[in-house]
Amino acid sequence: MSAMMRKVIVTLGASALALWTMAAAAHHSAAQFDFSKRVTIEGVVKEFNVTNPHTAAVVEVTDAKGTRDVEYEGHSASHFYRAGYTRDMVKAGDKIAILIAPRRDGGDGGFIQAFTVNGRTIGFGGLSPVTGKPVESESGSAAPK
């Protein structure tokens, strides 16, 4: 194989890898969510999948727009388990309240910041599931993230 052909192959391979990397990064971007706002939604769980790279919940929501299934995205499985989530904690048919960072475009969906189901509350990043603000520890500093 000639040196010129090797350069072409290496250049094409590097370009393909760069494009794939950009697409993967864009897919996992949280830029679509407005983390400066918090909204609590209530509904009935249709699906709740705590998996990597991120958790997905489908909740039947009834509001002024009517009744529909809405998908919410959340942290990775390891974040959920470290926050106190246990397998089978959330099942289809459970009533749930979810504190979300809403979509910037105003559409349905959002990023899960905390949730309450069956009398148990799980919050992420030191956020209160009630206020969406950092929880203060006994020492007066914000809870660890």
Image: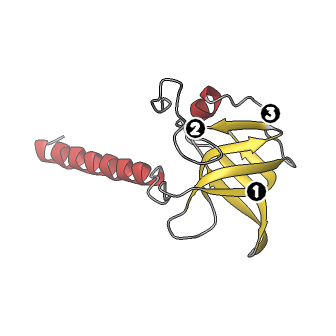
Q: Secondary structure at mark 3?
A: loop
Location of residue 22 with respect to 144 vertically, above or below = below
Q: 126 or 112: nearer the eye? A: 126
The residue that label 2 is drawn on is 124
Name the side, left or right, on which 73 lies relative to 70: left
Report helix, strand or loop for mark 2: loop
Q: Nearer the viewer, residue 145 or 86?
A: 145
- Residue 1 in percent (x, y) is at 19, 40
Q: Which residue is mark 3?
A: 88
Question: Circles 1 and 2: CB distance less than 8 Å?
Answer: no
Is tag 1's residue or tag 2's residue first in the polypeptide sequence? 1
Q: Earlier in the sequence, mark 3 or mark 1?
A: 1
In the image, residue 70 sits, relative to residue 63, either above or below, namely: above
Rendered residue at 34%/53% (across/down): 19
Query: Mark 1 belongs to which amino acid?
Result: Glu
Question: Which amino acid, by three-letter code, is at mark 2?
Answer: Phe
| Left or right of 133 on screen, residue 58 | right
Q: Are marks 3 and 1 in contact (CB under 8 Å)?
A: no
Q: Which residue is pictured at 70% across the width and 61% down the height?
A: 70
Mark 2 and mark 3 lie on one chain; the one further toward the N terminus is 3
